[in-house]
Amino acid sequence: MTALLGILSVILIAIIAVQLGKVKELAGKIRGEEEIEDIGNRRQSSYMLAFLVLFLVGCIVSAVLYRNYMLGYGLPAASEHGVTLDKMFSITLFCTGIVFVVTHILLFYFAYKYRAQKGRTARFIAHDTKLEIVWTVIPAIVMTFLVVSGLDAWNEVMADVGPEEDFMEIEATGQQFGWTVRYPGEDGKLGEKNFQLINGTNPLGVNWEDEKSLDDFQPTDLVLPVNKKVRVRITSRDVLHNFYLPHFRVKMDAVPGIPTYFVFTPTKTTEEFRQELRQHPEFQGLVDPTDPELGTMWENFDYELACAELCGRGHYSMKMPVKIVSEEEYLDWKAKQAPLYTSLIRGTEADPWIDRLFDYEVEERKEAFNANLENALSANNAEDRILELSNVSFETGSAALETLSRYELDYVAEALNNRSEIRVELAGHTDNTGDASVNQQLSLDRAEAVKAYLLDKGVDAARLVTRGYGDSQPVDNNDSAAGREANRRTELRILSGSL
Ligand SMILES: [Cu+2]
């Protein structure tokens, strides 16, 4: 038994010795790995320093290199308030730039300096009043400065026009996917709008009964005079859009149902801005390298109105060219714009003024009538002494004068009253539709209706003869509607009197 215990003791001592050796070996291995780790830490922390340098240099170089592509830093604003905004952005960039550089230097330098090292433990700071004061007070002062100067700039930029101020007002309506701009005409005032009036021919819902809307026009380009204060009324027909003129630092939401506005003064004409771009290498390239005739980028530059609200799949196409021109060029351009009312609405079913002529139309017709009358009076052969009263018309199948006929009949009365030597025949004509004897009677009745009107205006009955020609003297073919319309007419035939 004692021998057995002795043998076991020897075996155990041997095992312990082996194990101790293994432990020693393991400990040696571990010490080596720590060293490997230490080498790794040092290497990675120096990468941090390298990254710090590359990153900051990259940021600064790209900011300098691409500054002309960034609004607000490179190319100066083309509007009055834009300069204020740019200044605000620069100050903000200056302050945040310092913080950006300092924090990044600290971040990566600390990652280097406080890397894991043998025997180093983290330092525990429970509280440091001085440090806390520093990192609270300094940002608070800077933030207060930025916020207050920002509010100041906001109030200046967003101020509406004063009651005595000289400005022009236009309207921009956003819809999927395009802008419609509306300018006031001669009166300088935009007509009323109502969404309930919107239909196929009136996409903005303009109220044509409002006389202010009669001279408004809707051009395809946004053209503005330089150095003139513009107030843009901004609305939307469907979803949220955003009225965005990047070069003028103008940006305002177009909200359905909530009218917004923006007041700004363009300070550089398109041509002046092109000359500015000419100074920069970024704008020397050709617009289309395959077609050098098209010219360089600066030559082709145009301001742009865009939509800055993602408003649907055609959002990208929602833009309009903007031209800033001199006052004279603007007036020239404006004079060439036809009011939407005269080109689309006048004389149609949608025209609420169908029963009256506007002053300019009265003037135009009167001038035309008097010129025709002079021609007829100075002519010698009977054929040329016939004057068609093209603006005198009757209700279908009746001798009742249509309302607008009175204007031309007034000129006739005025001319006859001014020249007592003139005697005329009032000749009625019809087309060949219907019975010839009925037409004969109708043409006479119509001539009589004209005579009655003229008598009422003080013309002496002895100077007027009436005659109905029925369909016997057509001036056009009766096969077409236009031809029949030309044949239905009333004529003034000069019997005596000359210039
Ligand atoms: Cu849009």
Image (cartoon, helix red, strand yellow):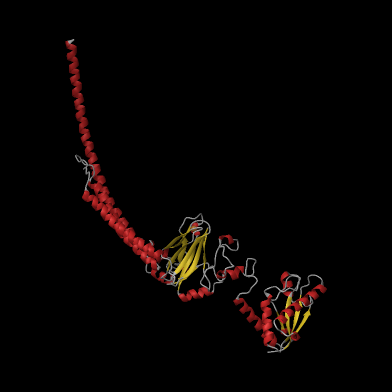
Instruction: Give x and y (percent) for residue 146.
Output: 32, 59
Using residue 424 as the reference point, say whether residue 333 is left or right of it: left
Using residue 403 as the reference point, say whether residue 14 is left or right of it: left
Using residue 403 as the reference point, say whether residue 148 is left or right of it: left
Q: Front-most of 117 and 304?
A: 304
Dividing the picture into quadrants, the one containing residue 459 is: bottom right
Instruction: Give x and y (percent) for residue 215.
Output: 56, 71
Q: Quick check: 329 above or below 14?
A: below
Instruction: Give x and y (percent) for residue 296.
Output: 43, 67
Tell me which residue sits at (29%, 56%) in the image.
57
**Label total for image:** 0
Using residue 489 as the reference point, say whether residue 79 is left or right of it: left
Q: Is residue 435 visible?
A: yes
Q: Quadrant of the C terminus?
A: bottom right
Q: Is residue 64 visible?
A: no
Q: Front-most of 42 and 366?
A: 366
Q: Quick check: 416 above or below 22?
A: below
